[in-house]
Structure formats: structure tokens, C-alpha cells
Image: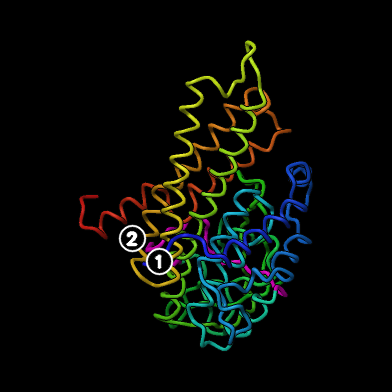
Amino acid sequence: MSDLLYTDVEEDLRASVRDLLSDSASPTALLARVETEEPYDLKLWRTLAADLGTAGLAVPEALGGHGASAREVAVVLEELGRSVAPVPFFGSVVLATSALLGVPDAPVAVELLGRLAAGELTGALAVPLSTAPGTGFPAAVKAATEGTLSGRVRKVADASVAEVLIVPANGPDGPALYAVEASNAVVKELVSLDLTRRVSDVILEKASARLIASGEPAVSALDSALVTAAGLLASEQVGIAEWALTETVTYLKGRYQFGRQVGGFQSLKHRMADMYTDLVIARAAARYAADSLANGTDVAIAVSVAQARNAPIAVHAAEEAVQLHGGIGMTWEHPAHLYLKRAKADELALGTPGRHRVLLAGLVDLPA
């Protein structure tokens, strides 16, 4: 295991992303946007993906990326968690790109990775967002002998703004990964709990597709993408918890009751201390998961530990933020509800904490 402290490069990356999000994803702008029919900020997404180069962080330089690692991607996700910016980073950079990186020698994957890394293309992995690692290859989509795909995949993250879909399908020769242009599919955006990361049903009716990989490489690439995404999601949950703590402390310092600063009441100090302790634990778990993904060591254990711990920590922190902001925290005009909804949606994504505890028990020989 390498040093889990942030490097200078990671801190510089954080500063760049934070500056961009502070300018373009303020709470006021965010609240106004989620009320519209176009909740995603695609201008911000292009700047983040192409101009800052975050779309290609994990893609090797030989394939058009920057040759960084999961650690750098995790830093970006922390900042996106702090802002809950409505951009398809998770669906495109984490899920879709990770699936393609599982088969980096496939010609179609090479082409798509170059375009995704450059920010020219937005992708989505056509699996339900709730899919946990190790649940087996999905059977929702069937591939015909001529290579067309038919089926329906429910609750796909960021599919409504994707230009290419990476679709797991079962065909005559077994499991395979296909690339489908979004224009060849029907994408129906659903009413999502999380207003800043939408989910959609993807409907394929004899849709033209290009084969990426088949057999064991396809199965391995999909599972690797789900493991990677679950591990990196922990860093987004750190960002949510950090925002909740920072904003709540600021509010309690400036709020007075009975002639006293509200933050001076001992019971509230204890709750803030508990939130801070949880944040430290969550950050350690997320950094361990990101470092393990970067180095390929103890990956399964690190990922399940991170999700088992961080998902409930993020939810609790967001709940505390709503409650301790008092009446304003309960209103639609305050962004706290967006963070609580993102935290709850993340808790269900890529395996619940209970599911990861079961996985972890098997990995370390404990009773489930």
C-alpha cells in the first residue's frame, strides 16, 4: 500500500476542479437548473471533461488519455460530491470508460476510449445503477445472430445525455459487450430520487451495435467496471459528508438563540464532533479503496469496506445537515435536500451496505 495522503498533483487537480465548480455550479444555479427540463449542465460537463481533461485521467496515454490512476479520479469525485454538480462524470468517466478499459486491446474499445478521453463523446454503461459487483452477467438484452440488440435495461445512470451506450448482452456465443449509438436506442428518463444524477430506461429494438468483446473478457470487463465504480463512489460520498459538515458548522456559528451562538450548545458540539469523526473514517476508507484500485492490491476487500462504511456515513451527515439547519433546511430553496437525495441514491447504487458486508464476510472468512 502506498501513501494515502494526497500528493501535490492531486491537490492541484482538486483546486482546479473546485474553482470551476465554485464558478459554474453554485447552489443557486444548481437549484434553478434541477427545476428545468434540462437538469444536466452540458456546458460545464464539456469544460470539466475536455478543457480540464478529467475525462481522460484513467485512460493510458497510448489510448489518448493522461495515464493517471483511480486516485486522481477519486479526487475529482470528492469535489463533485461536494457540489453535486449535474454532470455525467460518473456514468461516462467511471462506469463506461472503466468497462472499456477492461478490454483495451479491442479495436472498438480503442476508438471509443480515445474519444471519451478527449471529452468528444459521453458514454453510459447500460446496467441498472443498483447492480452490485459479483451479481453475474445481466440477461436483460439479447443479441441476434446478425448483431442487433433487443431488450430493456432499467435505471441506467446518465443515459439521457449519453451519446454511446456500452451494453452487456447475451447472444448466440454467450456474454458480450456491445457499443450502441444512443440514437439507435429509446432512452426514457425516469422520475429520479436524485435530481442531479438522473436514471433512465434504455429500450433496444433490433438496434444496430458493434461488438466490443465476447466471452470471459466481456464478463471480466463488466465486473471490473462495477468494482471500480463502487470503490470510487466512496470518494463522492466523502464529498457529500464534507459539504454537510462544513455547511452545518458555518450555519451553527452564525445562528443565535436565547442570546447564544447555537453552535456553542454542548449537545450540538457533540453531534458535530461525531460528524467529523465519521468524515475522517470515510476519507480513510475511500483513499484506501482508490489506492487499491490504482495498485491492484486488496481491491475487493477495500471496495467493500469503503461502501459498507461510507454509504451510511454520507446519509447520516446529510440528514444531520437538514435537521441542524432548522426550518430553512427543510425547504426546497436550500440545497441540503439535494445532498440527502444524492446520498440516499448512492447508498442504493452498486450494492447496498448490507450487500457489501456480505461480500466482505466471504472475503475475510467471517460468517455472513
Q: Which mark is residue 252?
A: none
Residue 72 location (% of width, % of height): 55, 66
Label 2, residues with CA under 10 Å away: few <14, some 14-19, many ≥20: many
Instruction: Name the residue at 60% across, 33% down.
Output: 248
Q: Position of residue 295 (x, y in %)?
A: 41, 72
- Amino acid bearing label 2: Ile
Q: Which residue in the structure is indicated by mark 1?
A: 292
Left or right: 106 in relation to 204: left
- Dot placed on the residue nearer the N-terminal end, 1 or 2: 1
Q: Are marks 1 and 2 in contact (CB under 8 Å)?
A: yes
Taking the spot 53% from the left edge, 19% from the top edge, the residue there is 265
The residue lying toward the viewer, choosing from 321 and 131, is: 321
Q: How is the image coloured?
A: rainbow
154 w.r.t. 263: above or below: below
Circle on res. 301: 2
Callout 1, which amino acid? Ser
185 inside magenta stretch = no
137 vs 52, left or right, is left
Which secondary structure dominates the residues rendered in magenta? loop
Where residue 235 appears, x then y in whole percent? 51, 55
Please tell me which residue is depicted at 70% across the width and 68% down the height of the picture.
52
Does dot 2 land on a helix, a strand or a loop?
A: helix
Q: Which picture quadrant has residue 134?
A: bottom left
**In the rendered structure, which segment of residues is drawn in magenta?**
119-138
Packing grade of label 1 (10 A; few <14, some 14-19, many >=20) is: many
Whether 2 is drawn above or below 213: the answer is above
Report x, y in % for residue 328: 68, 26
